[in-house]
Amino acid sequence: MAERFSAFSFVDRITRLEPGSRAEGCYAIPRHLSRFPACLVAEAIGQLAAWVSMSQLGFRRRPVAGLAGETLFFGGATPGQVLDLAVALETCDEDAVAYGGSARIDGSTVLELRHCVGPMLPMEEFDAPEAVRGDFEVLRGPGAPAARIRALPDPEVSVIDRVPGKSLVATLRVPESAPFFGDHFPRRPVFPGTLLLDRQIALALEVAGEAAGAKLAPSRVTDVKMRSFIAPGETVEIRVELQPQTGATITAGLAARVNGKPVATGRVEIASQEGR
């Protein structure tokens, strides 16, 4: 694949395709990476769904992050492992794609997406249609070069306010330029929603850990909504607030703003890591 697809593309091959309906694919997580967050597993599933929808619409339009009704976490992924990806499209037209999907490692499901919707926008606003078509043919044929991603994005996050065990406010500084903007997207660089969600979950775990005094992990994320694009150079204000606890699960509300305007919302459910 082209150099511009070497920093934030998490599908190596599309191994099975039912046009406009279903697909399977794989991604080998490079061994040299220090970590591979669960949110990037979700990104890989979403990217496979995007390839199916783009090909169905003749590469005239492409999906962008919109709604993710439910994300279920069953385990982690580590560098050196291979993700087996599967997606099923519920609907796909000029306006939106609705889909669900999963990722498995060695036959065990590590993450599942349910009730996701991506608005479809004109492809040429984000990328060259013929270049994307060519990359799709590579994925359907020999596959993308292995271990092409040298490092994952690591945006700077600073905590600016905290009520221990209850809430937290932080800022995330989106870089002015970075290799992953070439993938996301060449003609209109956008900060990936999954990177924002990864930082939000990490902060939620920090606050929940103060309240619970135990080692925790995300178990479920619901009602994620990306309300607008986040551009290079912007500063995102992240707010995490624990909700009243019922039972063993801790729930945190997630919100993000840029210049006072909402850009993302969601909820994360957190549970003890024991037995996981």
Image (cartoon, grey):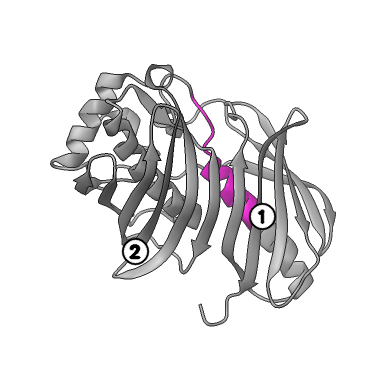
In the figure, residue 31 lies in which quadrant? Answer: bottom left
Q: Identify which residue is drawn at 43% across, 19% down.
A: 187
Whether residue 12 is situated above or below residue 275 in the rendered picture: above
From the top left corner, tell me how far across and down residue 186 is, in percent.
40, 23
From the top left corner, tell me how far across and down residue 154 is, in percent.
54, 44
Whether residue 210 is situated above or below residue 236 in the rendered picture: below
Q: Earlier in the sequence, mark 1 or mark 2?
A: 2
From the top left corner, tell me how far across and down residue 104 is, in percent.
34, 64
Whether residue 201 is in magenta: the answer is yes
Amino acid at the residue labelled 1: Arg
Task: Give the residues drawn in magenta, as a range.
Answer: 189-203
Left or right of 119, for residue 246: right
Q: Identify which residue is drawn at 58% across, 29% down.
A: 229
Badge number at residue 104: 2
Left or right of 28, for residue 73: right
Task: Pick the residue in front: 128 or 150.
Answer: 128
Query: Regarding mark 1 in the picture, which secondary structure is present there?
Result: strand
Question: From this viewpoint, is residue 150 visible?
Answer: no
Q: How many marks?
A: 2
Q: Identify which residue is drawn at 39% across, 41% down.
A: 91
Residue, far right: 163
Badge number at residue 267: 1
Amino acid at the residue labelled 2: Arg
Task: Pick the residue in front: 31 or 271.
Answer: 271
From the top left corner, tell me how far across and down residue 215 is, in percent.
64, 74
Question: From this viewpoint, is residue 109 visible?
Answer: yes
Query: Regarding mark 2 in the picture, which secondary structure is present there?
Result: strand
Q: Quadrant of the N terminus?
A: top left
Of helix, strand and loop, which mostly describes the magenta segment? helix
